[in-house]
Amino acid sequence: MSWTVKHRNYLDKVKSGDVKVVAEVYRDLMLLKRQKELSFGERRILESAHQFLASEISEAKGISMKEAERILESFFEDEERSDED
């Protein structure tokens, strides 16, 4: 699948507002980020997904956006540490 098609699919998924679908995009791009430097477009989509998910976590848990962002980022920090072991 070409990058153009992937990019459009990722954008459509983020715009859907479906938490599960946006989380899948976030996961996919975070994993891709481990393998290579993300393109400008990929970074923008990742940031959009990150903001959306942090906002959802913040609302659901009644916590600040900063706290929600830390929670979101911690999912991948833990996995990165276990990859290094």
Image (cartoon, grey):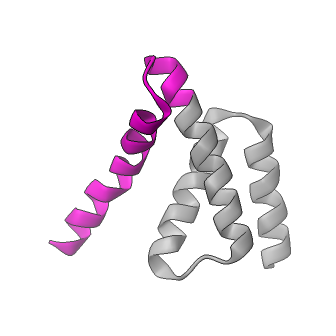
In the rendered image, the vertical position of residue 31 relative to residue 21, given as above or below: below
The magenta stretch spans residue 78: yes
Please tell me how many numbered marks the rendered image carries.
Answer: 0
In the rendered image, the vertical position of residue 53 relative to residue 61, given as above or below: below
Where is residue 51? Give x, y as percent.
60, 43
Where is residue 45? Give x, y as percent.
70, 58
Residue at left 57%, top 29%? 56
Tell me the quarter of the picture where residue 19 sits.
Answer: top right
User: Is there any visible trace of residue 22 in the rendered image?
Assistant: yes
Q: Is residue 51 left or right of residue 45?
A: left
Residue at left 49%, top 33%? 65
State which region is magenta: 56-85
In the rendered image, the vertical position of residue 67 relative to residue 12, given as above or below: above
The magenta stretch spans residue 20: no
Where is residue 4? Give x, y as percent.
85, 73
Name the foreground residue: 41 vs 4.
41
In the rendered image, the vertical position of residue 67 relative to residue 60, given as above or below: below
Tell me the quarter of the picture where residue 59 sits.
Answer: top right
Residue at left 56%, top 61%? 28
Name the magenta segment's main secondary structure.
helix
Q: Is residue 20 left or right of residue 75?
A: right
Where is residue 70? Give x, y as percent.
38, 43
Residue at left 14%, top 72%? 85
Name the foreground residue: 41 vs 9.
41
User: Is there any visible trace of residue 1 in the rendered image?
Assistant: no
In the displayed image of the protein, which residue is found farthest to the bottom? 36
In the displayed image of the protein, which residue is found farthest to the left? 85
Q: Quadrant of the N terminus?
A: bottom right
